[in-house]
Image (cartoon, grey):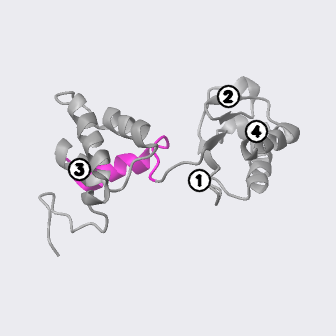
Amino acid sequence: MSQSRHGEGRSAVKPTDLSGAQRDEMLTIIARFEGVEGAALPILHAVQSAFGYIPQAAVPILADKLNRSRAEIHGVVTFYHDFRSQPAGRHVVKLCRAEACQSMGGNHVASLVEAGLGITMGETTADGRVTLEPVYCLGLCAVAPAAMVDGRVVGRLDAAKARALVAEVEA
């Protein structure tokens, strides 16, 4: 097995799995942050903004350009809940899973939304329409339980609002 300069084995996904345009876009994004200390997070946010997720094939490129190991970049991508390793659905529903929302019925609301969509947290419907994600605080404790639907916050979720939310994203 060949070894990279970071001492890791060859990855199953190669940087060449990105299209030429995607690779060029990645390099443009990285160049915008050249010389910026702690550039990994801003670069990852910019890559996700450009592609909708962090392609696995981007990790070796980022590691090389940031002089980090692939494991370090992968660790950052998987540690932060805001980063995705797969494309999201056309609609993204984020349900707050923090204690305040749970204490106000968030677990029941989550169960209703999961059942309504036919998926569990962290999954995307088979048709690619909806991604359901947990989020660990929306800062809406006063109107718990809360959710975010395509960037729009929804508070005081109950069974009726949960069913309406499912109907909205499935329409």
Quarter of the image with the C terminus is top right
Q: Which of 126 and 42 is in front in this view?
A: 126
Judge the density around disc 1: few (<14), some (14-19), many (≥20) Cα neighbours within 10 Å: few
Q: Mark 2 points at which residue?
A: 153
Which amino acid type corresponds to the residue marked 2 in the rendered image?
Val
Which numbered marker is on residue 103?
A: 4
Residue occupying image coordinates x 48% and y 40%: 82
Q: Say what amino acid the circle numbered 4 marks.
A: Ser
Q: How far apart are marks 4 and 2 (CA)?
A: 19 Å
Badge 2, how many Cα within 10 Å: few under 14, some, many 20+?
some
Which residue appears at 63% of the width and 42% of the height? 91
The answer to which quarter of the image holds residue 32 is top left
**Which mark is drawn over residue 122?**
1
Q: Residue at x 83, y 37 (%)?
A: 161
Q: Does the magenta stretch include residue 135?
A: no
Mark in front: 1 vs 4: 1
Q: What stretch is highlighted in magenta?
A: 68-85
Q: Which of marks 1 and 2 is nearer the N terminus?
A: 1
- Give the image location of residue 72, x and y in percent: 28, 50
For numbered disc 3, what is the local secondary structure? helix
**Quarter of the rendering containing residue 134:** top right
Q: Which amino acid does label 3 sit on?
A: Ile
Distance of mark 2 from mark 3, alpha carbons? 35 Å
Marks 1/2 in contact by CB < 8 Å: the verdict is: no
Q: Residue 61 carries which label?
A: 3
Residue 12 coordinates in the image, percent (x, y) = 30, 69
- Please tell me the numbered disc located at residue 81: none
* Sequence-earlier tag: 2 or 3: 3
